[in-house]
Image: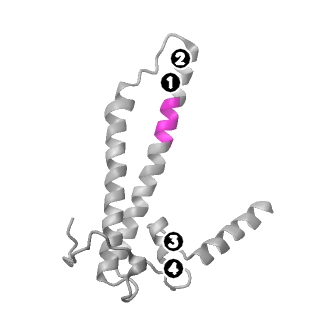
């Protein structure tokens, strides 16, 4: 999928090997491509679930154990789809940040997020240090 900037992404491109400026057009295109591809996979899985699992699920089974098992499976599938729906929302937000030239920068400090972190978690909005601070704060607030 071509971006509005029509930047060509080399097939073997790795942003960590890029010696150019942080979040240069090729780097942005790399992350745009990854995010769009990831979103497409999630949407495809969701559609497959709707077509196969959820439409074909018969929850009114005569045997109580079978019914409980089917309801548990159904609930688990719905929770999984809900998590994926939230993930798609985060992917869409990341794509918006790319368009706004805010992608790749920590929301808390404004510093660049490491490329290794962005490759591992392309929807990251915090640097590793800021994320660890947030997690420590959450832990201490939960312990109260």
Residue occupying image coordinates x 39% and y 63%: 91
Q: Quadrant of residue 104?
A: bottom left
Report the residue marked by disc 3.
117
Q: Callout 4: helix, strand or loop? A: loop
Q: Is residue 76 magenta?
A: yes
**Number of residues whose C-alpha sits closer than 10 Å to that of mark 1, classed few (under 14), some (14–19) or many (20 or more):** some
Q: Give the extent of the magenta segment.
A: 73-79
Q: Magenta segment: does it hold 12?
A: no
Upstream in the sequence, badge 1 or badge 4?
1
Q: Is residue 51 left or right of residue 109?
A: left
Q: Which label was assigned to residue 66?
A: 2
Q: Secondary structure at mark 3?
A: helix
The answer to whether 63 appears left or right of 2 in the picture is right
Left or right of 7? Residue 133 is right
- Disc 4 marks which residue? 106
Residue 93 image position (x, y, % from top left): 39, 67
Numbered disc 1: secondary structure: helix
- Residue 130 versus residue 53 in the image, above or below: below
Query: Mark 3 or 1 closer to N-term?
Result: 1
Circle nearer the N terminus (3, 4): 4
Q: Do the CB atoms of the residues marked 2 and 1 lie less than 8 Å apart? A: yes
| Mark drawn on residue 27 | none
Front: mark 3 or 1: 3
Cα separation, mark 3 vs mark 4, equals 11 Å
């Amino acid at each position: 999928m071509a971006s509005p900037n029509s930047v060509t992404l080399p097939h073997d491109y790795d942003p960590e090997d890029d010696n150019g400026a942080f979040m240069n057009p090729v780097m942005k295109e790399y992350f745009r491509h990854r995010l769009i591809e990831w979103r497409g996979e999630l949407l495809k899985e969701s559609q497959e679930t709707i077509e196969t699992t959820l439409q074909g699920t018969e929850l009114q089974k005569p045997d109580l154990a079978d019914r409980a098992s089917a309801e548990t499976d159904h609930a688990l599938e719905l929770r999984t789809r809900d998590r994926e729906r939230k993930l798609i929302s985060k992917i869409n937000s990341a794509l918006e940040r790319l368009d706004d030239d805010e992608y790749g920068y920590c929301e808390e400090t404004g510093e660049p997020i490491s490329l290794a972190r962005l490759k591992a978690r392309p929807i990251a909005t915090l640097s590793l240090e800021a994320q660890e601070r947030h997690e420590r704060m959450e832990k201490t607030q939960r312990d109260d």
